[in-house]
Image (cartoon, rainbow, N blue to C red):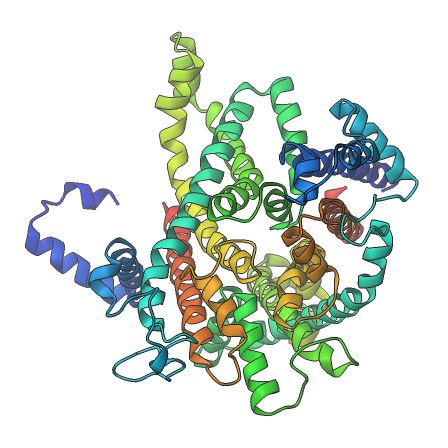
């Protein structure tokens, strides 16, 4: 297990360094002359331009630029926003709590709802109810999240007035966006768990367990569920890790001042250092959740190690 | 499958076979017909749309659905139904072109990597691992941030973000195909790598790749309309479905139809694509 842990950790660090390089080259190199992009057409003097070039080390070769960028990054310096002239890390930190609340609740809802619905679905006998549930799950997987958000807004905010439509004030403003974010992910988890349960229940050790005279509930809980949960862990890791990206769309729908909205605004304003910081943050979160899922997976299933 | 090839195909038997298929797979038939309808709308929007998608009649602004305007009219009196039909071409072509981009680039990478193996494969796969470190559309977001907001960049961005998936799929397939006797046989008979890849490996890749591409098409539609919705893809007044939804967002309280119908179009299209892809997947597995 220890060897496995070290191997996974090293691979994770390698990929993370690669991710910094890739995001650096996409965002800093593709736009061509970054100063022109950063200035966005505002008239300027050669002195200002030269100062900007120096500030962003654009007078250096690209690999030196990357080295300097990494040097700053290790010290926790993500650069300076082109718009607010504040450090990128401060800008992100200001917006982080709002997004953390949103994704935290969404993760809890997706995991709880997804597993409940998945287990419930696997208990249902073949019939119209089972088919209805599977149709519902299929529909939710195909649902554009922003449309789902707009529908929830129309019904629960404009029609019934139960929840505020926009902003980030108190738990009430959190319910609709969290549900919107959680529903598609929950549906994926439910579908996977149900398929897994149906698959596992066909295995011979289940027949053995039943033949031993164990109660059906015990067979399902102790023998089937544990094995059916294994693939769910991996998918849950991927889903949870991508919720931060999902918040980009949801925060736009509900006009919440979080990281996702910041990302969109920064792209529109061509504030590339902020975009780069957010991209790096999202990739790190994704890598870490996947790593945790991998380790959990290996802890549960010794065959993986 | 084999019986299909041996029976004589006459127009009448073809029709009866199609009817039998429709009875056996009603949902798949329905979805295929819907996709056919969409293809018609994408090819001939002017024939199918009753009104002008870009010019509105201000007097008729924000009218609800009626016989004159099936999906109602928007804030400046444009017919929403006509806009949805004209948007089909944009939304579908963005998805198809994005899938094609990912498929060609990823497929080529996977083909070369899987065929040559060794250090080529090792380097390529580490690079793919790094690309996989970006969840879903994050890589696409970075590309759009760097290149600017436009339809072309949207296609490129979504296509590139799918490259790792196609590369891994094709590489895996090539690895298993390479060991098969007919490939080893042609290597032994002196055929070059290009010929083997084109003549022997590529044809056998088609089936899994097609299944995967249909799944990718549904995802590409969701992603591209999401980007247009948040303002990073097609820009208004384009009738792209996601951009229309963004337009309808501000009128949600008093003109629900402005957002409801473009959203429904995306939803139904993704469902149809997903149903067909699942059917294809089951079919290829059973062969």
Q: Residue at the spot x=61%, y=24% of the render? A: B121
Q: Position of residue A9 (x, y in %)?
A: 83, 40
Q: Does B215 sit above or below residue B243?
A: above
Q: Which of A222 and B208 is in front in this view?
A: B208
Q: Does B184 sit above or below residue B10?
A: above
Image check: A200 left or right of B199?
Answer: right
Q: Nearer the viewer, residue A148 or B8?
A: A148
Image check: B259 left or right of B37?
Answer: right
- The quadrant of the image that shows the N terminus of chain A is top right
Image check: B121 left or right of A112?
Answer: left
Q: Where is residue A302 in the image (x, y as percent from the top left)?
A: 77, 47
Which of the 4 image quadrants contains residue B269?
Answer: bottom left
Q: Where is residue A158 in the image (x, y as percent from the top left)?
A: 58, 87
Q: Which of B141 and B74 is in front in this view?
A: B74
Image check: B176 left or right of A212?
Answer: left
Q: Position of residue A90 (x, y in %)?
A: 87, 55
Q: Residue at the spot x=74%, y=69% of the render? A: A102
Residue B246 visible in this rendered orientation of the protein: yes
Q: Residue at the spot x=67%, y=63% of the render? A: A247
User: Given the current orientation, which residue lies at the most extreme bottom position?
Assistant: A160
């Amino acid at each position: 297990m220890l060897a496995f842990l070290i191997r996974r950790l090293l691979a994770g660090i390698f990929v993370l360094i690669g991710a910094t390089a890739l995001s650096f080259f996409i965002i800093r190199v593709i736009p061509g002359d970054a100063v022109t992009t950063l200035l966005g057409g505002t008239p300027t003097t050669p002195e200002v331009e030269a100062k900007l070039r120096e500030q962003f080390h654009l007078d250096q070769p690209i690999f030196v630029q990357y080295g300097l960028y990494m040097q700053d990054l290790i010290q926790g310096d993500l650069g300076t926003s082109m718009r607010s002239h504040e450090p990128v890390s401060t800008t992100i930190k200001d917006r982080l709590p709002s997004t953390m609340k949103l994704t935290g609740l969404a993760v809890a809802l997706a995991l709880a709802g997804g597993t409940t619905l998945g287990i419930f679905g696997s208990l249902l006998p073949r019939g119209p109810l089972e088919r209805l549930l599977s149709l519902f799950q299929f529909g939710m997987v195909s649902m554009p999240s922003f449309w789902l958000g707009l529908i929830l807004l129309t019904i629960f905010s404009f029609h019934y007035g139960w929840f505020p439509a926009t902003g980030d004030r108190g738990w009430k403003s959190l319910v609709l966006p969290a549900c919107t974010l959680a529903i598609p992910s929950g549906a994926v988890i439910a579908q996977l768990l149900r398929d897994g349960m149906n698959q596992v229940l066909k295995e011979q050790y289940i027949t053995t367990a039943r033949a031993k005279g164990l109660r059906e509930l015990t067979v399902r809980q102790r023998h089937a569920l544990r094995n059916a949960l294994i693939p769910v862990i991996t998918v849950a890791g991927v889903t949870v890790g991508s919720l931060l990206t999902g918040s980009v769309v949801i925060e736009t729908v509900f006009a919440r001042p979080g990281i996702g909205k910041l990302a969109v605004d920064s792209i529109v304003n061509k504030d590339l250092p902020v975009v780069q910081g957010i991209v790096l943050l999202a990739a790190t979160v994704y890598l870490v959740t996947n790593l945790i899922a991998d380790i959990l997976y290996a802890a549960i299933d010794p065959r993986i190690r | 499958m084999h019986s299909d090839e041996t029976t004589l195909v006459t127009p009448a038997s073809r029709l009866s076979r199609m009817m039998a298929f429709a009875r056996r797979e009603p949902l798949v038939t329905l979805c295929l017909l819907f996709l056919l309808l969409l293809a018609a709308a994408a090819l001939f929007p002017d024939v199918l749309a009753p009104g002008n998608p870009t010019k509105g009649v201000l007097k008729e602004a924000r009218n609800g659905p009626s016989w004159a305007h099936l999906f109602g009219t928007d804030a400046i009196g444009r017919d929403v139904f006509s806009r949805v039909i004209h948007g089909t071409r944009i939304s579908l072509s963005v998805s198809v072109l994005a899938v094609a981009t990912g498929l060609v680039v990823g497929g080529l990478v996977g083909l070369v990597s899987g065929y040559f193996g060794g250090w080529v494969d090792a380097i390529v796969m580490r690079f793919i691992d790094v690309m996989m470190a970006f969840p879903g559309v994050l890589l696409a977001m970075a590309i759009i941030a760097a290149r600017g907001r436009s339809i072309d960049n949207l296609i490129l961005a979504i296509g590139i973000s799918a490259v790792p998936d196609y590369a891994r799929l094709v590489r895996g397939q090539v690895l298993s195909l390479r060991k098969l006797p007919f490939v080893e046989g042609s290597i032994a008979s002196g055929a070059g790598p290009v010929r083997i890849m084109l003549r022997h490996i590529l044809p056998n890749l088609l089936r899994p790749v097609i299944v995967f591409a249909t799944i990718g098409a549904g995802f590409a539609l969701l992603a591209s309309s999401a980007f247009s919705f948040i303002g990073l893809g097609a820009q208004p007044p384009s009738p792209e479905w996601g951009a229309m939804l963004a337009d309808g967002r501000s009128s949600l309280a008093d003109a629900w139809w402005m957002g409801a119908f473009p959203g429904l179009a995306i939803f139904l299209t993704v469902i149809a694509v997903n149903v067909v892809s699942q059917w294809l997947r089951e079919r290829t597995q059973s062969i």
